[in-house]
Image: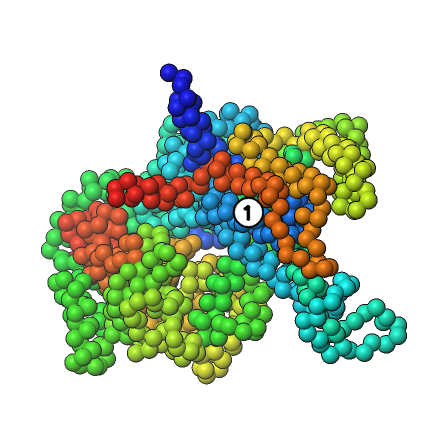
Amino acid sequence: MTSAPGTARLLRRALHAPEAGRSNALPAGAWWLWALGLATAASRTTNPLLLGLLVGVAGYVVAARRTDAPWARSYGAFIKLGLFVVALRLVFSVFLGSQIPGSHTVFTLPEVPMPDWAQGVRIGGRVTAEQLVFSLYDGMKLATLLICVGAANSLANPARLLKSLPGALYEVGVAVVVAMTFAPNMVADVVRLRTARRLRGRLTGGVKAVAQIGLPVLEGALERSVAVAASMDARGYGRTAQVPPAVRHTTNVLTLGGLLGVCAGTYGLLAAQGAVYGLPVLLAGLVAAMAGLRLGGRRSVRTRYRPDRWGVRAWLVAGSGAVVAAAMIWAGSLDPEALHPGVVPLTAPVLPLWPAAAVLVGLAPALVAPVPPTALGLEEHDHRGKEQA
Amino acid sequence: MIRFEQVSVRYDGTDRPTLSGVDLAVPEGELVLLVGPSGVGKSTLLGTVSGLVPHFTGGVLSGRVTVGGRDTRTHKPRELADLVGTVGQDPLAHFVTDTVEDELAYGMESLGLAPDVMRRRVEETLDLLGLAELRDRPIATLSGGQQQRVAIGSVLTPHPKVLVLDEPTSALDPAAAEEVLAVLQRLVHDLGTTVLMAEHRLERVVQYADQVVLLPAPGAAPVMGAPAEIMAVSPVRPPVAELGLLAGWDPLPLSVRDARRGAGELRERLASASPPGSPVSAGVSVVPAPMSGGPRPGRLARLLGRTKAAETPGPADPISRVESLGVRRGRIEALRRVTLTVAPGETVALMGRNGAGKSTLLGALVGMVEPTSGSVRVGGLAPARTDPRAMIRRVGLVPQEPRDLLYADTVAAECAAADRDAGAAEGTCRALVTELLPGVEDGTHPRDLSEGQRLALALALVLTARPPLLLLDEPTRGLDYAAKGRLVGVLRSLAAEGHAIVLATHDVELAAELAHRVVILADGEVVADGPTGRVVVSSPAFAPQTAKILTPQEWLTVSQVRAALEAGA
């Protein structure tokens, strides 16, 4: 009975992603860890082929797993932002020159003569192919980072991310959530009032229109915030439990110390030479901050309704990001040349096989993450269509 | 359950208390209805129960309010949250989270209930309120009735002993209102919840009340008693009670069913008189004959409208013609093949559930919404493509929220701006305001006006340009019977002057009072179009109370019956 085909079937069934619902939704944190893993990998290379592969991986996962929710539409905006960054980097390089020595002149711009005190600043002048390629690589790196963040943003519900904050930060989280729902409401108000101007026989466009409705919009927003505050108060927001002063002080020390540690550690990691002490300081800081927040949570009597669970799928998603990051860092220490294709002299970038294979691990969420209902509906529809055909 | 002991409330900067001498006890497990004209302090009284007055709103509360033994002076709203559930007038302002399920759980999370308890109660509440299908939906995508149910559900989950509701059905269509009321009744009957609620639309709720508290005038002491007794003396009462008083029934009926039982004799007295085909108003004479008298004007009116334009352009030429209008918003078809003609002097009521496309149709008529297909002509122009300055002389719309029209900080400044916008002689608008809204001073801030006064001001602003076509979107939301009566008077005389009026409304009584013709929209399509009597009498949802009581005779309003009785006597 337990033959090979049987196990294969079981495995396939286990791998087949279920329809996403409230109970199996991936924690927002898992998506963010995955995206940060890809971003870390991107920050370690300037190889355009690897960067392109990373963007492709992020894009594919977004396409496969995003929902219809409003925040899910932000991905396109992030891609545009990335392209803008690349273009900006190139423009700066063309007009302001670059430190990269190069011999292949592409064209020469008229150079603005600079006074003596501005030695070292150059406007215009010779533009070399090396310098352009270098800035293109650099811009692409930044753009990839942005796109990875955009992917997380469109896959994870920002409100859910805030909900998974520790209890002590809950009130800050609510403030942010309420503020986030306010922005769309205010936009809706502006649109409504602008169209209402028509009813008074005034033009709906122009700066004057916006200026005139500014006050009513603000009034409306203020009234709404007071109403929400009243509603929250009447529903028990801010009920607190008594805690002894000693616990309060310990909380403060732990939290502040921990955050300082996190800052110092992060700096160490990002700076070129601090990698040795960076990681331990960061970890110690994180632990202290977590302990502080945990202790601070005692003040709050709140409980959580159906928090997102870290299940196997969440670990797989977060882990795939971590694997990509770790592999890229390892590859960087093993063979830095492959990840940073030469600019001087110019060489064609080569796709390093193993790092590229590691990047593909980042596709795992497109297989294991639960499928959002609409996408599933369409897929099934397609499937049925094919079966009938 | 709730005790008021010599309670009075005074807000800062006012010379007299908003509430005074309130001495009441609301027993456990009763549905108590709070009635009274606008501005008598109903919302303030409700606020004292949840502690929002005075802890949140400011002001001075003297006396004592205790809820389940807890004094609201020493307990903040959040400390009463497990005992009192409050839903305000606007459900949208009530929501803190973004999906239905989270919203239901929010109050319990704040109270720190155990996760398994929360889960169980959310499931129970989803079933109790019929929200199970909507559990994952973003709240912003729900209809008005659904939102109101979610708001009620969100305060039910902590199992409060007391539920306080401020106008829970005012913004809802008749069917959605019944949904909400059925839920409330279930709570009172099955769970023993004490419900205290204020509502203007008495015709919807008074029959469900165990007791009624009447606040007769601002600052006056409230009267509490059985619904029938209070309705007999109340300045505000639903048509069924009005009819009962007129016919001298005792005890006063509160539901259509009670009234029908005693209505046989009244029907006989009315048998000799014949109900008018359309509401009695001076406007009838102006209405072109085919419109009010045709046997099946649904199609006929359209047909006539079309042929008439071709043959005899004259005073009865339609002011506005909409032909197979379609409007799309993204993927949603808000309107589909809507055809409608409106003649001068005619009053048309647009009805239909929330989201049926009523506001979109009005928007298309005034040019705020661009048609996707079909055509809209108002005074011969396409509203969306015409300069707004030219358009206001042909059509005016009073939006659902009249405040949207008001920008200035005094009434006088609004009027001056309206005169300028309309190119009217100086003082035109002010004269209109004085006529519609006597006793309002120039320096008053529009925000300090009551709901009804603000509506009148917006109406005056729109009328300054003398548009022959006047559109009103949900004009009676938040109005008491007196303000509604004044509005009816104003609109009738406008119709008599030859203005065509189109109003989108859920208020069947208003439609019965005013409209010559009723158009019912559903899912963006016209499903009925005909004289008021014919359309509403046959519909269980849209029939006014008088019609329900006196069927098969086609009486629509109490005033028609009164006129007929007086003529007979």
Q: In this view, does A138 lie above or below B157?
A: below
- The structure residue drawn at horizontal position 28% and vertical position 68%, both measured from the top left corner, is B374
User: Label 1 amino acid?
Assistant: Ala
Left or right of A383? Residue A121 is right
Q: In which quarter of the image is residue B82?
A: top right
Q: Nearer the viewer, residue B101 or B275?
A: B101
Residue with the mark numbered 1: A58
- The structure residue drawn at horizontal position 81% and vertical position 69%, both measured from the top left corner, is A121
Q: Position of residue B257 (x, y in %)?
A: 23, 40
- The structure residue drawn at horizontal position 38% and vertical position 27%, both measured from the top left corner, is B190
Q: Quadrant of residue B340?
A: bottom left
Residue B495 appears in the rendering: no
Q: In this view, does A261 lie above or below A42?
A: above
Left or right of A48? Residue A267 is right
Q: In this view, does B470 lie above or below B22?
A: below
Left or right of A185? Residue A162 is right
Left or right of B362? Residue B25 is right
Count up the numbered dots.
Answer: 1
Q: Where is residue B33 in the image (x, y as percent from the top left)?
A: 41, 41
Q: Is residue B146 above or below residue A120?
A: above
Residue B387 appears in the rendering: yes
Q: Which of A313 and A179 is in front in this view?
A: A313
To which chain does the residue with label 1 belong?
Answer: A
Q: Position of residue B326 (x, y in %)?
A: 30, 63
The quadrant in which the C terminus of chain B is found is: bottom left
Q: Quadrant of residue B332?
A: bottom left
| Secondary element type, mark 1 | helix
Q: Position of residue B260 (x, y in %)?
A: 20, 42
